Image (tube, helix red, strand yellow):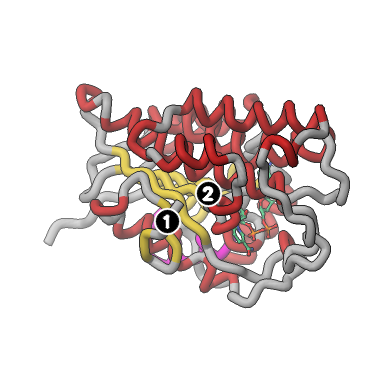
Amino acid sequence: MGKEAERYVVVTGANKGIGLAIVRQLAKEGITVVLTARDATRGNVALESLKSQGLHNVNFHPLDVASQESILALAEWLHKTYGGIDILINNAGIINLDKDVTFETVKPVLDTNYFGVKNVTKALLPLLRDDTPGGARVIIVASLLGQLKHLENKDYVKTLSDREHITEDFVDSFVNHYLRDVVDGSQKEGGWPNWTDWVNYPFGRPVETYSVSKVAVIAYVSALHNTLVAQPGSGKKINVFSCCPGYVATDINNNKGTKTVEEGADTPVWLALHSPEEGIGKFWTERKVVDF
Ligand code: NDP
């Protein structure tokens, strides 16, 4: 049997938590991993910890997903260093740190969890190669908090349920509408997720913006899939998936989660390795498709 072609994967927000566990598991599979982090010191510490575990097929490059300049610098470096990549895993994410839901607290969450994911994906799509079996893959780590049952706005639930017709422009307008309603203080009238018991919620922080951002990325995966299948002439096969890692003990929930990071990494890693044809464009958890 001939030697398998070398494969390359980029993981965002990978200096700790689920992202670092994803890097570790993929590196153990023999895939060359680009561990990215917004802070170079934290990224390099993570890289060294992997090397000390005998994993030398990992490289580091800075990436702040909320900065277009940083995204373009990574794309250029990947192009020069590897020529292309095979898999992209958008894992970076944040939650409101402040209990007040205002433009200032909401904007960074949307910029990281939605616009950041979208901008990284758009910049790296041209670098994706589909010459490994099953095609190129883009995996986006979302959350069960992004399921439509958390939205009270019935019009959005109806439109976003029609997965095959979701467009990227529509998802942008959905996110921008939420931001406008935050500025106007009319989230309740707008039918946005309303977590009145947020203090008791296991994340211990307000999750409504986080929830909107995760609805948006799950919808974005469907929209991107629709765009990709509508352009068969492009010749490239790129499979996109969204997934929830489960409730995992990490800094995002003050380590209250019940799963380990290795368990949380399982579904994103499994999707990266298996790219199941029947679930392309869909939302996954525990290695199964679940309702959006
Ligand atoms: P962590 O807080 O442990 O990790 C989040 C990672 O994202 C960190 O590496 C953080 O970097 C990075 N990050 C944040 N902002 C940026 C940015 N602008 N650019 C690049 N990297 C950034 O949380 P988790 O490991 O739990 O979260 C990983 C993903 O899993 C997130 O998308 C989260 O929403 C999702 N998720 C987690 C669940 C859980 O129960 N833990 C449940 C459902 C989904 P830094 O160290 O610099 O802050």
Task: Report the residue marked by disc 1.
Answer: 291
Please provide percent x and percent y for residue 48. 63, 61
The residue depicted at 58 percent of the width and 25 percent of the height is 173
Q: Is residue 30 magenta?
A: yes
- Residue 241, labelled with which disc? none
Kind of element beneath mark 2: helix
The amino acid beneath tag 2 is: Leu
Instruction: Give the Cα distance between marks 1 and 2.
Output: 8 Å
The amino acid beneath tag 1 is: Asp
Query: What main secondary structure does the magenta stretch of the protein show?
Result: helix
Please provide percent x and percent y for residue 88. 44, 44
The residue lying toward the viewer, choosing from 163 and 41, is: 163
Task: Report the residue marked by disc 2.
Answer: 148
Please provide percent x and percent y for residue 196. 78, 56
Position of residue 83 in the picture relative to residue 198 (left or right): left
The residue depicted at 55 percent of the width and 65 percent of the height is 21
Please provide percent x and percent y for residue 105. 82, 40
Q: Are marks 1 and 2 in contact (CB under 8 Å)?
A: yes
Q: Quadrant of ligand 1?
A: bottom right
The residue lying toward the viewer, choosing from 7 and 138, is: 138
Q: Quadrant of residue 107?
A: top right
Residue bounds of the magenta highlight? 20-32
The residue depicted at 60 percent of the width and 56 percent of the height is 145
Kind of element beneath mark 1: loop
